[in-house]
Amino acid sequence: MSPVSYELRENIGVITVDNPPVNALSHAVRVGLVDVINQAQADDSQALLLICAGRTFIAGADISEFGKPPQEPFLPDVLNAIEQSNKVIVAAIHGQALGGGVETALACHYRCAADTAKVGLPEVNLGLLPGAGGTQRTPRLAGAKAALDLILSGKPISADKAKDIHLIDAVFAAQDLEAQSLAYVKNLVDTNAPVRRTSEQVSDSEEIDSTLFDDYRKTYAKKLRNQFAPQLIVDCVEAALQKPFEDGMKIERAAFLQCRASEQSAGLRHIFFAERQAAKIKDLPRGTAPRKIQSVAIIGAGLMGGGIAMNFANVGMPVKMLEINQESLDKGLANIAKIYQGMATKGRISAEEASARTALISGTTSYEDLSEADLVIEAVFESIDVKKDVFTKLDKVCKPGAILATNTSYLDIDQIAQFTNRASDVLGLHFFSPAHIMQLLEIVRADKTSDEVMTTVMALARQIKKVPVQARVCYGFIGNRMLRQYQREVQMCLIEGATPAQIDKVMMDWGMAMGPLMVADLAGLDISYKARQALSDEQKGDPKSYRIPDVLYEMGRIGQKSGSGYYIYDPETKARTADPSVDDIIEREAANFGVTRQPMSDEVVLNRLTLSLINEGFKILEEGIAQRASDIDVVYCFGYGFPKYRGGPMFFAQSRGLDKVYQDICAYRDTHGPMYWTPSKLLQSLAETGQTIDEWEKENAS
Ligand code: 3HC
């Protein structure tokens, strides 16, 4: 049965798209639309209304079709057929009209929307551009600037805002949308309103500054570094203003096809689906009911605890923070109030919202006050003895059924669970700093964590707008375990000949959000030094992999906060400059290890750093620490600044070729020894058999 149906309601032909879950424009929908448009031209209808069933209007092209051979009719042709209809067509939008959904609405002659609806062109988030007339029709209605803002930001706007910029003609109360839209169409018929084709409209004569397009090009060259879709979007919108519609459409089509075939779009599309997959836990019995979480307690009101607390206050949930003394508690609460005030000053939230959120977070110094909390998250010092103290106390005071979580980055959560008499209620909730901003949440499932607890926290994570990924227990879980290998290799490259500025530049140019040594300076070399002190020599590994940060720490160069670390920082502007004396320190320490430093090519730096991540990623997958390879990609892209347009380390490895990746790792093992470069067995087997990660996962699922 076609997902597009058609019925006559009096003199109006109503076209309904019903393609759950989000009415994506799959091949069947495109065929159905063309069929009903043709049918409607010849029947008794006097005008047409396009609506959607289910939770939303059309949410775009079907992204899963993009990697496959294209099938006619193509969307631009379908939309052309809609626009060329001799009968007036009106779109009625509810939920979200996104991407191809907006383009469909723009091809209709008039547009109504529910007051709760959102309208957006998010293609840029997938490394694409609106490819069915969006870059040509939007500026004709909204003007170049509003069109560029909408398309380049990729962010949906409200129905009212869309009406302000002339994309929508009428906004109705959500519950009356269908009835009101029908009345709207009837009124068009009664008043003999003409067919109004967007393609025939001339963009409003808004004054276009001669630098407008170049300014957008420059801004987005920085904002979406290395990505070419944003630059092509500007070209297309510029063409919309300068050329006839048909010529603009040809330019858009060529640019769209270029984007669709690109590795950048493949990477971003992979991450789109990976993010949604990560929220699903494979072995949870269907129908496991979550527990109710209505109040949260946080142990520790430091930066991490405060950031975690804000996540819950942001969605209206009361939070109690516990500190060991009133002074630390007051400091933590004041810090949160300051952050909320800052958000209000910047206009991100209203002053009332800032006060309301601040008021949701209260404090205590007594464990007794946590007895009613549904969820407790501990964010105290990383020491197993301190955790033991906290969890023993929690076990005594918390009500039955409360979930007890640790925010530890490395410690053994199975061991922590044993400090209580309710191991099935214990798990890790690993937030990333700053916890109120970073999207990733590693959910560490310990040996005895119950299905019910897992179901609860996965749902809760979505509620607080995090991107959750399940990890099992091991040192560093998914993210930090890989990070350790990456950081180790950074240090080895320094000792062998690379410089801090070179390493950071190579990784930034490649697309990482920050260079690894910039990150180290920002996080503070004191933090990593103290964490190292808790490790045995064996855990610390080769001294070459930590000698330089030890020396910098001992010199008081602890990073940005002390004005120097791997770099020097201007006390006023915090501007970073390379420091030749650090190169001298590295030279001296390398000599102490008997290493003669040699210049290292950028290519080698990049290879060693990415391969160190990838090899560990495969080990994590083969050990079952991560459920699937794409979960590892989500962790790295959402928590560690890995470029999403490269799809994450595992996707990048697959697209580079697993045999090539394996050979390179073997070559490093042969020159640097097996200590850090033993290839993962899984990687070896895939490289030797030619099986892809996907194929291996499917085989193992059965
Ligand atoms: N194509 C195929 N599948 C899609 C899809 C799409 N455009 N949009 C969503 N889905 C799938 C999701 O993968 C998910 O599948 P799953 O249940 O198997 O995991 C399911 O629909 C539900 O999606 P969400 O979990 O994301 O549901 P939400 O309610 O949280 O969000 C949404 C709904 C806001 C519509 C969100 O899914 C979304 O942002 N979708 C993508 C929208 C988009 O990017 N559109 C542009 C596409 S490109 C395009 O149109 C090109 C054109 O210009 C030619």
Image: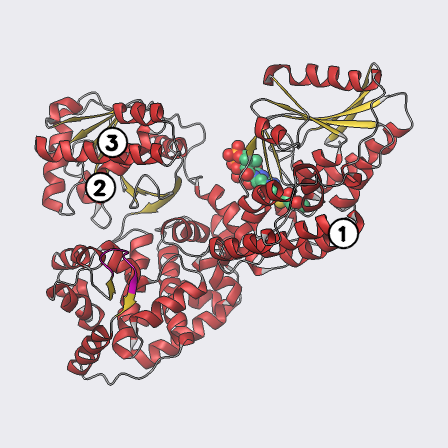
Q: Which of the two discs, 3 and 2, sits closer to the camera?
A: 3
Residue 430 picture location, percent across and down = 29, 43
Relative depth, front residue between 178 and 53: 178
Residue at point 14%, 22% (across, down): 369
Relative depth, front residue between 667 and 302: 302
What mark, if any, has residue 243 been given in the picture? 1
State the colouring used for the structure image. Answer: secondary structure
Residue ID for mark 3: 337
Mark 3 or mark 1, which has the lower sequence index?
1
| Residue 404 can be seen, yes or no | no
Q: Quadrant of residue 202?
A: top right
Residue 263 picture location, percent across and down = 57, 60
Residue 6 against residue 444 in the figure, above or below: above
* 340 sits left or right of 82 in the view: left
The CA span between labels 1 and 2 is 54 Å
Amino acid beneath label 2:
Leu
Residue at point 55%, 58% (across, down): 264
Q: Which segment did they paint magenta? A: 570-576
Relative depth, front residue between 246 and 628: 246
The CA span between labels 3 and 2 is 12 Å
Residue ID for mark 2: 303
Secondary structure beneath label 3: helix
